[in-house]
Image (cartoon, grey):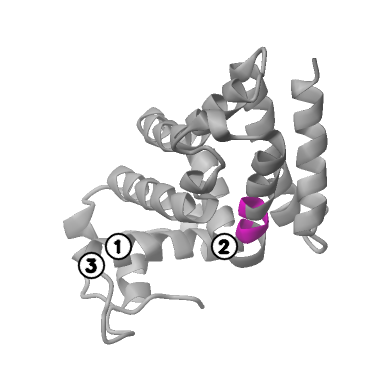
């Protein structure tokens, strides 16, 4: 089992990060039923009660996991790497397609467990309004830059086009992790080609 021990390295993670990362690992490996305060303590190698001290309720533990998920996804998807992140007018559709393909391929190649944890939390958020708010707020950190870049690229309906583009990204990730393409995910070149085709259709005058 891929667990995180408190003393696994000479420079251990801060306890709150260790707990949140371990919660995500457990979600990926055991599903929602496998996530308990006791299980996090045991998997992280922490004294019993450590997780409860950080997140006293199950809702609090799930919110902790969602916030950590957002931090880790920001590092993987890296909105700051999108072309024109600081100056949207400098973005070009080809550069945007390349950046999105790079981010998606990075996720599929190196962070599959994190995606499974994300899907567990997304489903749970449909049943918990307080978690839904946290989950949606985290998701806006990726969607909002895409809207700005599409606007700069000449989209006549940037909000609608951003919805389609983000939905395509989510669909690719889901299909390649939990769907029929899990055994043969697309290459970065294939992802770039598909994204380019999608953007060409959106931005064609």
Which residue corresponds to mark 3? 15
* Residue sitting at x 30%, y 70%: 41
Can residue 69 be seen here? The reply is yes
Which of disc 2 and disc 3 is earlier in sequence? Answer: 3
> Which residue is most to the left?
53
Residue 80 location (% of width, % of height): 46, 45
Can residue 38 be seen here? The reply is no
Residue 78 location (% of width, % of height): 50, 50
Total marks shown come to: 3
Q: Nearer the viewer, residue 198 or 32?
A: 198
Corner quadrant of residue 90:
top right
Q: Secondary structure at mark 3?
A: helix
What's the CA distance linking mark 1 and mark 3?
5 Å
Q: Nearer the viewer, residue 52 or 65?
A: 65
The verdict on residue 140 being magenta is no
Q: Secondary structure at mark 2?
A: helix
Q: Work out whether 135 lies above or below 105.
A: above
Q: Magenta residues, as a range?
A: 103-107
Q: Nearer the viewer, residue 198 or 8?
A: 198
Q: Secondary structure at mark 1?
A: helix
Q: Main secondary structure of the magenta part?
A: helix
Corner quadrant of residue 165:
top right
Marks 1 & 3, CB-CB < 8 Å contact:
yes
What's the CA distance linking mark 2 and mark 1?
17 Å
Q: Which mark, by number, is residue 17? A: 1
Q: Which mark, by number, is residue 113? A: 2
* Residue sitting at x 34%, y 66%: 40
Relative to 115, 59 lies left or right: left
Residue 82 location (% of width, % of height): 55, 43
Relative to 158, 177 lies left or right: right
């Amino acid at each position: 089992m891929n667990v995180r021990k408190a003393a696994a390295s000479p420079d251990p993670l801060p306890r709150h990060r260790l707990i949140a990362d371990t919660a995500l690992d457990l979600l990926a490996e055991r599903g929602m039923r496998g996530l308990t305060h006791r299980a996090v303590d045991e998997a992280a190698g922490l004294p019993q009660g450590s997780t409860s001290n950080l997140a006293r309720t199950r809702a609090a533990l799930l919110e902790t996991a969602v916030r950590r998920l957002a931090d880790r996804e920001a590092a993987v998807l890296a909105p700051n790497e999108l072309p024109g992140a600081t100056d949207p007018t400098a973005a070009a559709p080809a550069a945007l397609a390349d950046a999105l393909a790079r981010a998606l391929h990075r996720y599929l190649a190196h962070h599959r467990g994190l995606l499974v944890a994300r899907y567990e939390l997304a489903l749970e958020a449909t049943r918990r309004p307080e978690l839904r708010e946290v989950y949606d707020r985290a998701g806006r950190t990726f969607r909002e830059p895409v809207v700005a870049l599409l606007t700069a690229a000449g989209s006549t309906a940037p909000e609608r086009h951003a919805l389609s583009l983000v939905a395509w990204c989510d669909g690719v990730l889901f299909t390649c992790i939990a769907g029929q393409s899990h055994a043969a995910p697309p290459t970065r070149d294939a992802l770039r080609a598909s994204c380019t085709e999608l953007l060409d259709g959106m931005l064609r005058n």
